[in-house]
Image (spheres, rainbow, N blue to C red):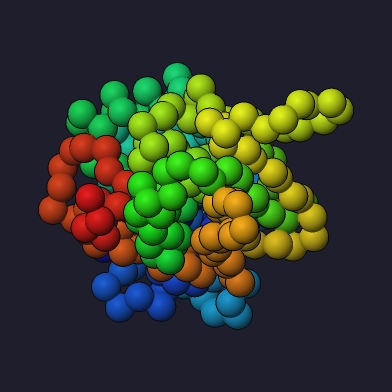
Amino acid sequence: MRIAIAGASGRMGRMLIEATTRDEGAQLAAALDRPDSPAIGEDACAFLGVKSGVLIRGDVEAALAGADFLIDFTRPEATLAHLDICKRLGVKMIIGTTGFSEAQRAQLAEASKELAIVFAPNMAVGVNAVFKLLDVAARILNSGYDIEVIEAHHRMKVDAPSGTALRMGEVVAGALGRSLTDCAIYGREGHTGERDANTIGFATVRGGDIVGDHTVLFAGIGERVEITHKAASRMPYALGSLRAARWLVDRSSGLYDMQDVLGLR
């Protein structure tokens, strides 16, 4: 698999590069960054103390000419710009970018009619196992339990709640026959009155270098059930992305997520 990595000089980009170079079935074909990045022209593996011969480039179209897949964990605007080029070149995409609006998600869906895409708010296999557990738990604890989603990330994260937290809320709401749009509460302040039992609350923490902690709390009378995932590094996201690429090899179009990749549908 000839893999291109977007955001190559960032923390996630570097983790993806490291995972790709360690995978016997993958080849680092290109490393992309903003044209104004000081990393342009550097060897993509310099941070590992080795030379790969792959230089970080700002010309996306030229770089992708030799790639089969683009793994993209950047920002929505950058991902959508990459999407147009990938569609033109037939480069399949694995997208871990979060913070998309509904209109931007619609652009991904439209492009997937011609291009194979795995798009997931979290590529970690463990997190996707948690999504499945949440579906089961919500169907069992469907009455008499207040539901709260608590997430914590590093101080540099720019969107809130996290894409993973929102997906957890969507899974739980769907299992209960609700729409998250109608029942989500994203902040509480002042005199809020009693809690509406039909809502799903979100609490966001930002600080330090927290990679990603997520807990869904089902609070009943006399008991609490908590389902938690904690990431100690970004490597699980990178390994999941490569697993998604392998799964996507034989697919030419369609919009998928990690539940498809892991056979959890």
Q: Is residue 249 left or right of residue 13?
A: left
Image point 30% across, 57% down: which residue? 244
Q: Residue furthest right?
A: 190
Quarter-wise, where is residue 77 in the image? top right
On the image, the x and y values in percent for residue 10 come to: 62, 56
Q: Is residue 189 left or right of residue 156?
A: right
Q: Is residue 89 above or below residue 213?
A: above
On the image, the x and y values in percent for residue 36 come to: 67, 41
On the image, the x and y values in percent for residue 149 come to: 60, 47
Is the N terminus in the top left, top right, bottom left or bottom right quadrant? bottom left
Q: Is residue 115 left or right of residue 16?
A: left
Front in this rendered view, residue 166 or 225: 225
On the image, the x and y values in percent for residue 194 come to: 72, 30
Q: Is residue 135 above or below residue 24?
A: above
Image point 50% across, 24% down: which residue? 181
Quarter-wise, where is residue 22 in the image? bottom left
